[in-house]
Amino acid sequence: MTEVKTLTSTRPFTDLTTLTPLGDGAFGAHIDPIWTIGPKVHGGCMMAVCAAAARDAVRAEGGAAAMQPVAVSANYLTAPDPGDVRLVTTVRKRGRQVCLVDVDLLQGDRIVVSASVTLGVPDEAASRHREPLAIDALPAEPTAAAARITADHPMAAIVHVAKGCELLVDPSAARFLAGELGDPVNRMWARPLSADEADADTAALFAIMLGDISAPVTMNRGMFGWAPTVQLTTYLRRRPAPGWLRVMASAQVIGEAWFEEDHLVLDSAGQVVVQSRQLAMVPRA
């Protein structure tokens, strides 16, 4: 089993997404054991690392400084362990408004994630139209009832990523924590550590990671165990404002073998910063 040590870095997400150029469009990265769910690397963290590689590949060729990974679509081939990984990038399109980069994340000689990353300049101005959202009812900052995932929390033994950021759960949604059934919905508050939040590029990648932060919503329906993500697509709509981020995860259809899980992330200004949808497998347990 992976040993998850006490966090010592003041900028753990920056450390995760700071890559070493290896030449010919390849980059090296080290995934610390805190970025795991159970013994395996967290899927959203792999999305963020792939996005970082695509961004670095485009910037290495000059220009595109304002571009961010506005869409990341990843297929998960296998679940890697923490440790050293290699990212191989291929720039498919270089444009003034849009760039497209393919990224393979490898552990050893094995491809574990294959991603396609679209880069562009995220929105900054106010939205021209925005529908009311269920997550709007969640307070912008954690309530007194919010459950912080600390060492003594029931989820702490599995959700190691909570060591690298601030992460609190809305217990009124996560009914599985009380041994009850509920709707397939989870709500959370998240925030990077201060040094990570202060870096705009890191904050954008952290928001992308939050597109996969929730425990599987199948837990609220009494379905526990590993729910492997097969495909995940995440949109970064704008760079997040500093402060707490609100996260809502939900599913509309839970089938016999498959379910979809959508994440929606709002920043402290109430703006939609991330939208995601994944196709995952219902736990067998």
Image (spheres, grey):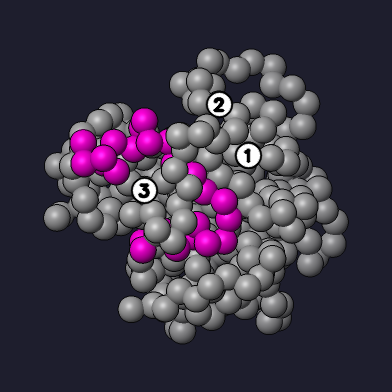
Q: Which of the 4 image quadrants contains residue 56?
A: bottom right
When the figure is inspected, residue 64 is found, relative to residue 24, above or below; the finding is above
The residue identified by callout 2 is 139
Residue 111 placement, left or right of 90 = left
Asked if residue 158 is among those painted magenta in the image, a careful observer would answer: yes
When the figure is inspected, residue 107 is found, relative to residue 45, above or below; the finding is below
The residue identified by callout 1 is 244
Nearer mark to the viewer, of 3 and 1 = 1
- Identify residue type, mark 3: Ala
Residue 55 placement, left or right of 31 = right
Q: Distance from label 2 to label 3 (Cα)?
A: 20 Å
- Identify residue type, mark 1: Trp
Instruction: Identify the residue at the far right of this view.
Output: 63
The residue identified by callout 3 is 215
Secondary structure category for the residue under label 3? loop
Residue drawn at the location 74% of the way across and 58% of the way down? 195
Q: Quadrant of the N terminus?
A: bottom left
User: Percent x, y for residue 26?
Assistant: 64, 76
Secondary structure category for the residue under label 2? loop
Residue 30 placement, left or right of 177 = right
Nearer mark to the viewer, of 2 and 3 = 2
Taking depth in this image into account, of 195 and 241 the one nearest to the observer is: 195
- State whether residue 18 appears in this view: yes
Residue drawn at the location 77% of the way across and 52% of the way down? 198
**For marks 2 and 3 on the same chain, the one whose residue lies earlier in the sequence:** 2
Magenta-tinted stretch? 157-180
